Every structure is written in C-alpha cells, then in structure tokens.
Amino acid sequence: MSRARNLPPLVPRKVAFDWSKAPLEWIPGQPFASHFVNEINLLLPAGEFWFCRVYNQALPLITDDRLREDVRNFMRQESMHARAHASAIRDYLNAQGVETDTNTRQEDRLFETLLADHPFGKPLPQWAQRRWLVFRLGIIAAVEHMTCVLGNYILRNERWAEAGADPTVLDLLKWHGAEEIEHRCVAFDLYRHLGGGYPSRYYLAAIAMPAIFGLWVHGAAHLMKQDERFAHRKPSVFRPWIWREWLRQSRAGWLPSPFWIALKELPFFSPAYDPQTEGCTEEALNYLRTSPAAAFAAMAPKAAA
C-alpha cells in the first residue's frame, strides 16, 4: 500500500545538550513532577534503538520511494533521540548520583529478549518471520501515537517555563516532542504498507499502551525512592499513592493526567484513524527552527551525545 501525504520531508537534526547546570529538580518546587518526567530519559533509549533495528529489517521490503526515504530519516531522528536521552542519563542523572541501571536493565531485557528478532533466543521458522516483523511494526505504531500525544502536550506546555524550569531539560523535551509530531505518520504508514491491518492494530494498542503506563510509573517510582522526601512513601507502581499523586499533580497543571492521555489514545482504536490529524507540523517546525540544542550542536559538534 502506498501513501499520499502533503507533508514536508523529514529532517534529521544533530543536537547537543550542556548538562553541567541542570538540577534534578528541574521544575522548581516540584520534585514529584521533575522525577516523573526525568524517567522519560530512562524509558526511551533502548526502545528507540530497537525501533531502528526493526526498521532496518523493514527497509528492503518498502516499495514506496517517499515512504522509504521517510523511514530512513525517521531512523536517524530516533537514533539521535536515543543518544540525547542517553547523554542525559550519563551526564545529568548519573553525574548527580542517581542510580539508573535498575531501570535501564529492565528496558534492555524487554527489547533484547522479549521483542528481539529471536524472542528468548529462539529462532523463528521462516513462515513466522514476516508476521513477527509486522507485529513489532504495529507495536511501534501504537507507541508512536502515544509519543505524538505527549509531544503535543510538551510543546504546548507553558506551565513549566512560567515556573522557571531548567532550560536545558525543557529544550530536550520540546525538541524531542516536536520531532515526534513531525514524523507522526511514518510508523503507521509503514505498518499498513507492509500489510498491518485494523484487528491486529487494535489488540497491539490494547497491550502496548497500558504497558507504557506501567513502565513509566514503575521507573518514576525508582527515582523517587532515591529522594529522601519520598523514600518513606516506598513508591511503587503497585501502591495507590503514586497514582493519586500523579492525579493531584495533573490537576495542578504540572503533568498530563493519565485520564487525559488515555482519552487521547482512543482515536488510535478507530478504523478511520489518521495520524496526520494528531498534531500540527508547522507548529513543530517552528520550535525546531529555534531549538537551543541545535544551535549548541552547530557550535560544538563534538559535544553531541
């Protein structure tokens, strides 16, 4: 299946971030929201590198020239996202004494064992390999819808900046969110191009989206356990406190509500779903033209993570 979209070609961008002055509580006076969003740095790199590995397998099967080029540039963008968040883990979180290996090992196991080319090290028969590829493309399409939703939220969020949020962390989030909006159609179009249908898209989304919620809260809880202000709460994905506090923080405008995110996920379950309606490309490009990280990379290319 070919596609016809009137969208600008994707542009891979090199970026670099100076983490030397970024505080862990990057939203002043809001440690819960700061930890909750910081978990994104731990959640994303393994998954985004996995996207690239899966898409490398799909590239030879693409028969639409424009889609093939968009997939290549999507991979370049995702690879840069992964490296940028990895730099945040190393030079921002680890540099300030935050233990992150517990979280990142879990992500690595998910993508290198369960969702690997050979799940749990077991080679697949020839007849199952194409199906397993399309299955994973469907997971990526579901995840990319959620990242577009969150990208829209972050790009339009003024609350953090008004509160004096650290500009480096804020730019990382807005740059990444803007590129998620820019390439929001690619994963869905590739999934359909290689034969992915609606019934499988429905159940894959029903699996992937709750899993992301769980991984996000679980990882944020691990960060909070290392903060003496929250340690007595014994944060855990299985304890009601962290979910109640997420809701309270969302009502105060510091985080997106889990109910709001769930509501924004519903269009993906529709047979008529079209990712192009889920964001504004020009709004994203307007930010990307002025992102400080892109300018910083141009001045100090060797600093890129």
Image (spheres, rainbow, N blue to C red):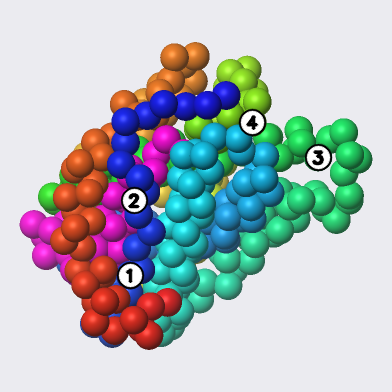
Q: How far apart are marks 2 and 4 (CA)?
A: 24 Å
Q: In which quarter of the image is residue 166?
A: bottom left
The residue indicated by pointer 1 is: 15
Label 1 crowd bin: few (<14), some (14–19), many (20+), radius 10 Å? many
Q: Quadrant of the C terminus?
A: bottom left
* Residue drawn at x 81%, y 51% as measured from the top left: 118
Label 2 crowd bin: few (<14), some (14–19), many (20+), radius 10 Å? many
Q: How far apart are marks 3 and 1 (CA)?
A: 36 Å
- Amino acid type at mark 1: Val
Nearer the N terminus, badge 2 or badge 4?
2
* Residue drawn at x 17%, y 50% as measured from the top left: 286
* Residue drawn at x 49%, y 20% as measured from the top left: 269
Label 4 crowd bin: few (<14), some (14–19), many (20+), radius 10 Å? some
Residue 146 location (% of width, % of height): 42, 39
Query: Looking at the image, how many numbered discs can be counted on the residues?
Result: 4
In terms of depth relative to the viewer, which is nearer, 34 or 296? Answer: 296
Nearer the N terminus, badge 2 or badge 1?
1
Residue 191 location (% of width, % of height): 58, 32
The residue indicated by pointer 3 is: 129
Q: Quadrant of residue 201?
A: top right
Nearer the N terminus, badge 3 or badge 4?
3
- Amino acid type at mark 3: Gln
Main SS of the magenta part reads: helix
